[in-house]
Amino acid sequence: MRIAGLLLLPALLSVSLPLSRGESSTYCVKWRATSSCDPHGQREPHNDAACSKRIASGLSGFCECESRRRVREVGCDHHEFTCEEACAEDSSADLSYPQGFEHVTCGSSIKLVHEPSRYRLHSHEIAYGSGSQQQSVTTHMARNDVNSYWLVKEGDGETACEVGKPIECGATLRLEHMQTRRNLHSHSHMFKAPLSSQSLEVSAFGVAGEGDRMDTWVLECQENQQCSADGQCEDDGLWKRGELVRFRHRSTNHLLSTSSKSRFDDSNCPRCPINGQQEVSATSFRGDDTLWFAGEGIYVTE
């Protein structure tokens, strides 16, 4: 078995090799605008801009570079710059995946990053004050919080998956919170999400990694689904790191979701220990807020 550690910073990606430098435009995708002078605020796609456009003071957002890398996160008070420049300057921190570690595998401990907000799936020894009163699940903006690691394993009641084997798109799986050993869990319509009344509560449940059938999720890989629909599929059908995926709850068919619109603060949760974090829920709406990708972690291979 081999292990690749991807802890905290992209510059620590095991022994990966840096991408070739080429022209700076190679590294840039687009300027992504946000609201309220908050780089982690609600996205404003209508204010996105090309990499070559100069971003003046008064605009908030971030530059998206290749491999979903996010740099130059700024509020409204900043010097003028272009994302083309920002991505090129930061390119040395972006390393390719080591050979053999391109996929998410059984037994890997990973951080799941929410695509629109870039918050990470998170849990902690804090119970909901209402609903199921089970351990709460949120998303957290910090990259280096140890409470954002999740162990990838087989679905409830299934034969144990082979450690180091890549997870197939369409597979059923569980995500076990590493610090508390409780599984990512959702419910029937009995418990609504605390802030999003149209969605279902998501919690962490179980003892020592064992819970029940409501811990099982189905992995939906966006790239795999798109190429299958086109009838020109060259995808390997495996969960690739950095690939956009969704997690569909097997029992309710709802999708794992979070949003900057559902952030805990003193207006909806006075003096709460989870203020500043985002609610995680299960929704029936198939939008961008249900998109995730595998980020930092400890990846194992056969």
Image (tube, grey):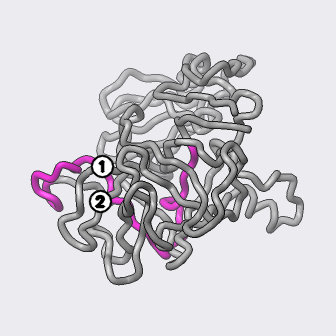
Question: In which quadrant of the rendered view does residue 229 lie?
Answer: bottom right
Which segment did they paint magenta?
266-294
Left or right: residue 184 compared with residue 159: left
125 to 52, vertically: above or below: below
Q: Is residue 160 above or below residue 100?
A: below
- Under mark 2, the amino acid is Gln
Rendering coords of residue 259 (x, y %): 39, 57
Q: Which residue is mark 2?
A: 135
- Secondary structure state at the residue bearing disc 1: strand
Q: Earlier in the sequence, mark 2 or mark 1?
A: 1
Relative to residue 289, is residue 58 drawn left or right? Answer: left
Name the residue nearer the viewer: 95 or 191: 191
Residue denoted by label 1: 124
Q: Is residue 289 magenta?
A: yes
Q: Is residue 40 above or below residue 187?
A: above
Q: Could you tell me which residue is drawn at 50 percent across and 79 percent down?
A: 252
**What percent of the width, then of the height, locates residue 284?**
49, 76
- Residue 282 circle label: none
At 59% from the left and 24% from the top, the residue drawn is 13
> Type of residue at label 1?
His
Looking at the rendered image, the quarter that the C terminus falls into is top right
Residue drawn at (50%, 73%) of the image: 213
Q: Residue furthest bottom?
A: 189
CB contact under 8 Å: marks 2 and 1:
yes
**Nearer to me, 153 or 117:** 153
Q: Residue at x 38, y 62 (%)?
A: 206
Q: Residue 45 vs residue 197: left or right?
A: right
